[in-house]
Amino acid sequence: MTLHEKRQDLDGEKRKVLLQRLLSELSGLDPNLYYQSTSQVALLLRAYIDGDAKLVQEDRKLLQGLAPRDIEVLLSLH
């Protein structure tokens, strides 16, 4: 495994952990989130990331290129 591949794996794991944290925050704000579809949750997470989520610049950079569908896939891989 090359260094580049290891870096991509690490970034992917960081994204999953970060998305789970943000999902937990968002669930605290909206208790009905549990009942939403994964695609709806992904859209809400994307909006949260772009808006009110308190993220350091490095975390924001990790998530900036993710489309709602990417978020949906990452959420399903835990």
Image (cartoon, rainbow, N blue to C red):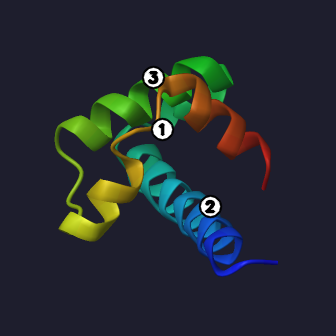
Q: Residue at x 42, y 36 (%)?
A: 45
| x, y percent for residue 33 | 53, 32
Give whichever of discs 1 and 2 has the lower sequence position: 2
Q: Nearer the viewer, residue 53 or 56?
A: 56
Nearest the viewer among 67 and 36 is 67
The amino acid on which the numbered mark 3 sits, given as a three-letter code, is: Leu
- Please say if the residues under marks 2 and 3 sit with CB atoms less than 8 Å apart: no
Where is residue 69 drawn, in percent x and y?
59, 24
**Percent of width and height locating residue 1:** 82, 78
- Circle 1 SS class: helix
Mark 3 surroundings: few (<14), some (14-19) or many (≥20) residues within 10 A: some
Left or right of 58 in this view: 75: right
Q: Residue at x 47, y 45 (%)?
A: 27
55 lies above or below 1: above
Residue 65 shown left or right of residue 53 in the figure? right
* Residue corresponding to mark 2: 12
> Mark 3 or mark 1, which is nearer the start of the sequence?
1
Front: mark 1 or 2: 2
Residue wearing tag 3: 43
What is the number of the mark on residue 31?
A: 1
* Kind of residue at badge 1: Pro
Q: Which mark is residue 5?
A: none
On the picture, is 35 further left or further right than 31?
right
Quarter placement of the C terminus: bottom right
Labels 2 and 3: the sequence-earlier one = 2
